[in-house]
Amino acid sequence: MSLPLFFFYLFSVIAVASAFMVIASRNPVHSVMFLILTFVNAAGLFMLAGAEFLALILIVVYVGAVAVLFLFVVMMLDVDLAQMRKGLLQYAPIGMVVGAILLLELLLAATSVVVAPEAAGTSALPIDNTMDNTRALGQVLYTHYVFLFQSAGAVLLVAMIGAIVLTLRHRGNAKRQDPVRQVARRASETLKVVKVKSGQGL
């Protein structure tokens, strides 16, 4: 067994095992930590495939930002595990249907080479071997897939707004600004002109 093949199997096994632990772990914080481990091993697989830009982006963006954001959100939400288990049986059929659909999609993707072997060697876009993968990826993203790229950004924006709404806590004794009152106030309510003689203070 060659060294790249050994690391491929090593990263793959750890990634699959940690991905399973993300959904099997009872502690949400542990699930996020296993998710970070999954991202790191996926970055290793990208490095073996020669896509070093995607590997570094996965480490910098997902591990360094998104996963840390997930960790802080999970810690601030104070999830009640007992309350979550009460509704487990209620949503179990929906979860099984969604899981079956995802499993079917994975099986179709895995067997696509066997079903349509001519599709494995074809590419929708011409590949320029003289160009580094970072420049080639940028040209593809910002030309052919620019609308999908912007749509992904909109999805991330919605996810960020959702995380803010979930972590927002309304407290009665908290002091908040009222922009309507601030804009509508008059100068006489906020400004007081005082005449002070020279050499004297207030």
Image: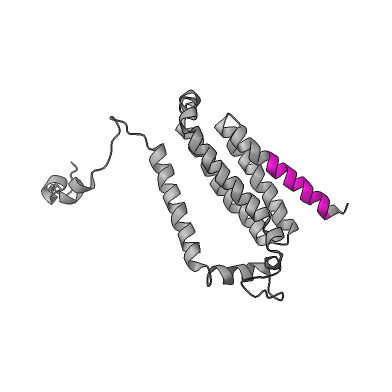
Q: Write the residue at 28% across / 36% down.
A: 175
Q: Residue furthest top?
A: 82
Q: Write the residue at 70% across / 65% down.
A: 120
- In the displayed structure image, the side of residue 147 where residue 118 appears, left or right: right
Q: Is residue 12 magenta?
A: yes
Percent x, y for residue 128? 68, 76
- In the displayed structure image, the side of residue 197 where residue 143 appears, left or right: right
Residue 59, compared with residue 130, is above or below; it is: above
- In the displayed structure image, the side of residue 120 where residue 194 appears, left or right: left
Q: Residue furthest right?
A: 1
- Quadrant of the image occupied by residue 100: top right
Residue 118, compared with residue 93, is above or below; it is: below
Percent x, y for residue 41? 70, 47
Viewer-proximal residue, 170 or 89? 89
- In the displayed structure image, the side of residue 125 where residue 194 appears, left or right: left
Viewer-proximal residue, 44 or 190? 44
Q: Quadrant of the C terminus?
A: top left
| Figure colour scheme | one colour
Q: Main secondary structure of the magenta part?
A: helix
Percent x, y for residue 10? 78, 46
Q: Is residue 193 magenta?
A: no
Viewer-proximal residue, 177 or 4? 4
- Quadrant of the image occupied by residue 166: top left
Residue 37, compared with residue 150, is above or below; it is: above
Q: Write the residue at 65% across / 70% down.
A: 123
Percent x, y for residue 150? 46, 62
Q: Is residue 59 visible?
A: no
Q: Is residue 132 visible?
A: yes
Look at the image and give the residue range highlighted in magenta.
Answer: 4-17
Q: Write the residue at 38% across / 38% down.
A: 168
Count of labels in the image? 0
